[in-house]
Amino acid sequence: MNGSSLAARLESPATVRAAGLLALGAFLYLLLAGRSIDLLGSPSRMGLVLAWAAVAAAFWLTGRASVVVAYLVIGGLLMRWVELPAGGAGPSDVLAAINEAIAVWFGGGNPYDHFYEATRPAGQPMPYPPGALLVHLPGYAASGLAGVQLTEFVLAGVAMVALAALGTTVSWLAALPALAIYAGASNLVLLATDGSNDTGVGALVLIAIIALGWSIDHGLDDASLMLAGIWAALAVSSKQIALPLVLVLAIYLVRRHGWRPARRYLAAAGAILLLISIPFLLQGPVTYVEGLFRFVGVHEDIYGWNIWAFAQGMGWTPWDQGPATILNVVVSAIALLALLVLPLRRPSGALLAGVAALLVVLLSARWTTYAYFALLAPVVLALPAVAIWEARRSAEAIPS
């Protein structure tokens, strides 16, 4: 996904205008989606609605996609900024646990055998890989828990900029509506500020996808492949459920480009994963490995978006925790194994298969918070741009 401004060269002004109008229309109605029965807007949303007509007029007169991009990114960041919790303590305990884990680590302790006070209830494990600590470390160093929370806000902005970059390099028709949805969807706004970390992981997965596309556009040279592998490692080391989305990138490389570039990609990713794991392996290898698997069946209750909550809603009797957890592990393993045998030779098809595998993992678990879907959002929204990118590469490969 190179920087030669393919969108500017291959998309007509009429196409760009249509994309911009669709994005502005989608964003307007997302802004108007209030939270009360009367659908009342917050001052920040009202301000963006008041500015909408001027932005639409400016875009109509200039035809510049940058006008729409600036409005969507600023609007998306503004809505998230006003939702940031005071002191960084959101309703989710994920970032509070990560903040405590970093403090324990800096104090010479082991985050993977620590009794956590910030989790709800206290004593819950911190089952996140070390990448979660590394990504939030700058924010922690700057401002403790508030800085850890601010990291998710920053990464939401990164995701928006990445979607805009797909517009300049691939297609405004695909990227502008995707950016509008990501910037304005109320649930995604909330999840960037509620104390969960899935927004940030989703942004890292999106960057890993773009980095691999950029490497392919640059002939899969060693430097770009190494960079793509590093981003992939950072994504999967921030949350285990990102694995299907990262795994399909490596599988696509093998299926489409052979083992040589795939080995270099996996070597870079593996080296980073090992490097950031070494401090915790030295503290206690068994404790560390056990900690990485503690997320499986950790919640005793049924909650969220899954087949067990559906069963309860239908009046059926769901399985007990033990058998349900076994089913979750088995079908998740089958979904991951299926990825290894599928002929994933197209990036959009590979990513779609990764999304499907992750849905199997999430929907078969007994506890599936909506926050997990913030991880999926940028990937799903980027799929149309990926499909256009691969179609253009296929067309360029056909001799005239």
Image (cartoon, grey):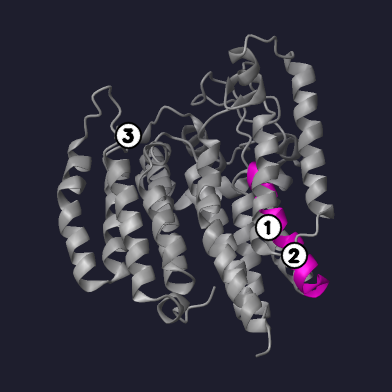
Tell me which secondary structure the magenta stretch mostly adopts.
helix
The secondary element bearing badge 2 is classed as loop
Picture coordinates of residue 225 (x, y %)? 66, 72
Q: Nearer the viewer, residue 274 or 163?
A: 163
Look at discs 2 and 3 and give the one toward the viewer.
Answer: 2
Residue contact at pointers 1 and 2, CB within 8 angstroms:
yes
Residue 172 in view of the camera: yes
Q: Residue 85: give its label.
A: 3
| Other-residue count near label 3 (Cα within 10 Å), few / some / many at <14 / 14–19 / ≥20 | some
Which region shows up in magenta? 240-260
Q: Nearer the viewer, residue 127 or 176?
A: 176
- The kind of residue on which mark 3 rests is Pro
Residue under circle 2?
A: 345
Gap in Å between the C-alphas at discs 2 and 3? 44 Å
Corner quadrant of residue 341? bottom right
Answer left or right for 308 relative to 370: right
Task: Give the residue displayed 78% in from the left and 32% down from the top.
Answer: 329
The secondary element bearing badge 1 is classed as helix
Q: Nearer the viewer, residue 110 or 158?
A: 158
Residue contact at pointers 2 and 3, CB within 8 angstroms:
no
